[in-house]
Image (cartoon, coloured by chain):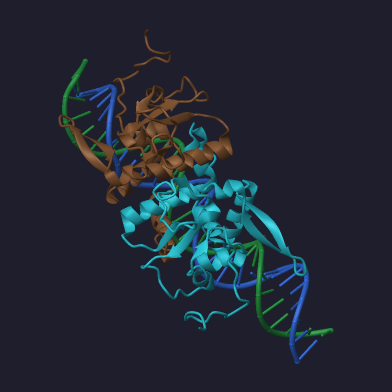
Chain colours: A cyan, B brown, C green, D blue
DNA sequence: CCTTGTTGGTTCAATGACCGAACCATGGAT
DNA sequence: ATCCATGGTTCGGTCATTGAACCAACAAGG
C-alpha cells in the first residue's frame, strides 16, 4: 500500500501489520519464501510478478526486517533472500488465509500441511491435533494435494511438487533440467 | 485488488483468498464488522476511508458473500451490513495479523482478545491455550489495552472503548452523545 | 578480444486504482 | 417549504502497477 497516510490514523495492530504486508504481492513473496524460494529469478518466474514490483517489494521487506540478504557465492557476487524470524512469524497469517481460501472459495485441495513428526494434517490454528502442540515452522511438511497441477510450466513449481518442509531451500538444476515427467526412474 | 489477471495464475488457496480480501481497506472493513460496526456511516468515520472506496468494497464483500445487507428499519428504508458465516470465518486471519503486528512492529498493547468463558488471552489463530479449543467468535471478548487512546475523536472509537464481545452491534446515541469523559457515574 | 549467457536489477510510457471534495437522492422532521 | 440524516455517485488529480525494454557485472567459450 505504501499508504502510511491513512492507515496511520488507525490505532490498531492489524492496520500496522497491513501497512507492512498489505500491499499487492507482498504476502505472496513471503509465502514463496516460506516455501523455500530464495532467488530473485525464482520469485520472478514462480509469481509472475513484474520485475520492478518484485524489486520494490524485496526492498521493503528487507527494510522491515522480514527478509535478509545473504551472500551465497562470491565469484559473481550473488545474494539470496531468506526469511528472518520476524518473517517466519507470518506463517500463521498465511496458514489461516490459505485455510479460509480453501474452505470458503475453492473447494479444491491444492496443498496439505502436515506435522513432519507424525504426518497429521495441521488444525485450523497450525497445531497438530495428534501431538497437541503448535508445530514449529521447520517441522511443517508441505505435500501436494490431489487437485494440484501435476506438470506445471515453470521449474520452481515443479520443484515444489515433492513433499518438502517449509523453509527448505529450493534448488534448481542449472537450466532445462527435470524435463516434465517424473524422476528418471 | 480487482486483479484477477495475475493472481489467477497462482494455483494456491492463499492467492485465491488474497484476490478477494487482499485489496486495500478490505480487511479493515471486515475487522470493523467483527467489532460490531454495521452502518455505512460508522465504517466511514471509523476507518477514514474515501466514500467511493467504501461503497466499492461493500459491494465486493456482498458479492463474495462475506457481508450481507439487512434491513433494520422501514420508515426511511435503512440497511446494515453484517458478516455472514464466511465473513466471520476470517477472524483467524485478522487475529494472526494483529498478533504479528503487536509482537513484531508495535510493542504497544492496544487491545486484548480473551476467551469470555475463562479470561485467557487468545493465541495466534484465535484459540484458547487454557481450554485447548478454538473459541467461537461470539465468545471472544475484546478489551481495551493500556496503550489505547482513552478519548478518541470519533464516536465509533468511543463506543469500542468498553469491553465487548465480537459481533455485538455498535449502537450510537443519535448525535453528540457520550461527551468525552467516562460514564456519568 | 569479442560474444553470449546468467543473474539481478533500473527506466519508461500507459493503464488502472485511490483520494478528497463536491454533488445527488430518499424520506422523515420542523 | 426547508432542513437534516443516511447512503450513496461523480469527477479531476495523483499515485501505484504493469509489461516491455534496457543496463550492468561477471564468467565461459571461441
Residue at horizontal 40 percent and vertical 43 percent from the top: B92
Residue A9 position within the rendered picture, expressed as x and y whole percent measured from the top left: 50, 33
Indicate the quadrant containing the C terminus of chain B: top left, top right, bottom left or bottom right: top left
Residue A183, percent from left and from top: 51, 80
Residue B16, placed above or below residue B155 = below
**What residue sits 42% from the left and 74% below the top?**
A150
Q: Quadrant of residue A167?
A: bottom right
Instruction: State the residue at coordinates (63%, 53%).
Output: A59
Q: Position of residue B17 (x, y in %)?
A: 39, 54
Note whether residue A69 is visible.
Answer: yes
Is residue D25 or residue A75 the one in the foreground? A75
Question: Front-most of A135 and B185?
Answer: A135
Q: Residue furthest top?
A: B185
- In the image, A49 versus B90, the foreground residue is B90
Viewer-proximal residue among A91 and A134 = A134
Considering only vertical position in the picture, is B161 above or below B93? above
Amino acid at each position: 500500500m505504501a499508504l502510511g497516510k491513512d492507515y496511520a490514523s488507525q490505532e490498531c495492530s492489524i492496520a500496522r501489520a497491513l501497512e507492512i504486508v498489505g500491499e499487492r504481492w507482498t504476502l505472496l513473496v513471503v509465502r514463496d519464501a516460506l516455501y523455500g524460494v530464495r532467488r530473485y529469478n525464482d520469485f520472478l518466474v514462480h509469481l509472475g510478478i513484474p520485475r520492478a514490483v518484485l524489486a520494490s517489494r524485496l526492498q521493503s521487506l528487507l527494510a522491515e526486517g522480514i527478509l535478509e540478504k545473504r551472500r551465497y557465492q562470491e565469484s559473481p557476487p550473488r545474494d539470496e533472500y531468506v526469511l528472518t524470524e520476524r518473517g517466519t512469524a507470518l506463517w500463521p497469517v498465511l496458514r489461516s488465509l490459505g485455510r479460509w481460501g480453501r474452505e470458503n472459495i475453492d473447494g479444491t485441495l491444492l496443498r496439505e500441511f502436515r506435522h513432519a513428526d507424525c504426518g497429521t494434517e495441521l488444525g485450523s490454528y497450525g497445531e497438530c491435533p495428534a501431538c497437541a502442540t503448535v508445530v514449529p515452522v521447520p517441522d511443517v511438511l508441505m505435500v501436494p494435494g490431489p487437485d494440484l497441477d501435476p506438470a506445471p510450466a515453470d521449474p520452481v513449481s515443479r520443484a515444489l511438487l515433492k513433499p518438502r518442509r517449509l523453509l527448505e531451500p529450493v534448488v534448481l538444476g542449472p537450466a532445462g533440467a527435470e524435463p516434465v515427467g517424473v524422476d528418471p526412474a
